[in-house]
Image (cartoon, rainbow, N blue to C red):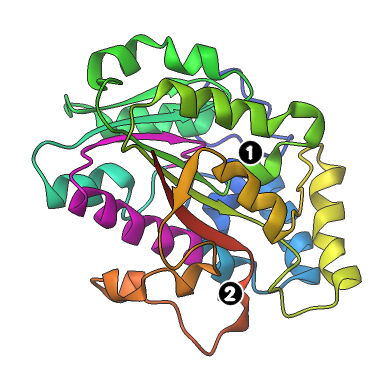
Amino acid sequence: MERPAWAPPGIDISVPSVSRIYDYYLGGSHNFEVDRQTARRAMEFMPGLPKIMQANRAFMRRAVRHAVDEGVTQFLDIGSGIPTFGNVHEIAQAATAQARVVYVDHDPVAVAHSRAVLTGDEHTDIVAADLRRPKEILAAPEVGRLLDLGRPVALLLVAVLHFLEDADDPYAAVAELRDALAPGSLLILTHASYEGIPLPEEVAGGTVSVYRDIRNPLVMRTGEQVRGFFDGFELLEPGLVSMPDWRPDRAEDGADAESPEDPYAFSGFGGVGRKA
């Protein structure tokens, strides 16, 4: 297997990564052959996976614009992945010169590529850290430099919580982050679920098995379970819904407009909550 010149040193290119698989679904180029093979295996069971990822990105862009509309100009994006078109800082900075963004990811390729993309941007930075250890995220010097936690922050957990098993206590991780945020802060969240997928659960479960085989379990939670992550937040209208159904009026370009006729776009949930 040929090692790409851009691959950071020390990375085992024979081990797949969910960040790089996600990059492949979105048409990116920062992925290895093992990631592409894994993605294609997952798509054998759920061929609409790229459409689901596109719906995730479109939801995120609409939610970021809404945050700016509410006067929130600080963003903490955990599980940010490999930068692609329409990143949080690009959307936020296009809306306000006051935008400050901190990305967080534990994948070395995501961190290295983010650093390269963000070179020269004094209002955006990347932290190499894991959602399972929120204290480390909150204590990161990049967070201290760019974000004032005494003012509202938009916390983004987009397509990341479903990679935390119950044993990781994801609800406690979200609660710890919530408690560190000021009133008026927003939680912007998406999560995978069997609910809404246009396939029998036993067929869609084949994709779950593929992720389990690469030791990155994909946890499909019910709407009620996903709603539990919003404890301490008031869900904004229209509530926890399929991603294309969350304020489609906030779409500003073709990249934000999911195809209503594509049923895969309606898989999983998206929502935004405000801390009281």
Which residue is rendered at x = 74% and y = 58% of the image?
222
Q: Is residue 21 left or right of residue 6?
A: right
Which residue is rendered at x = 65% and y = 73% of the image?
48
- Give, as a three-letter code, the residue at label 2: Phe
Q: Where is the C terminus found, in terms of image quarters?
A: top left
**Residue beneath disc 2:** 266
Q: Is residue 215 left or right of residue 32?
A: right
Q: Which residues are magenta?
A: 54-82
The answer to which image quadrant residue 134 occupies is top right
Q: Can you say whether 217 is above or below 109 in the image?
A: below
Which residue is rendered at x = 79% and y = 61% of the image?
41
The disc at residue 215 is: none
Per the image, is 153 magenta?
no
- Give, as a three-letter code, the residue at label 1: Glu
Q: CA distance from mark 2 to mark 1?
A: 37 Å
Residue at the outermost bottom position: 261
**Residue beneath disc 1:** 2
Q: Where is the N terminus found, in terms of image quarters?
A: top right
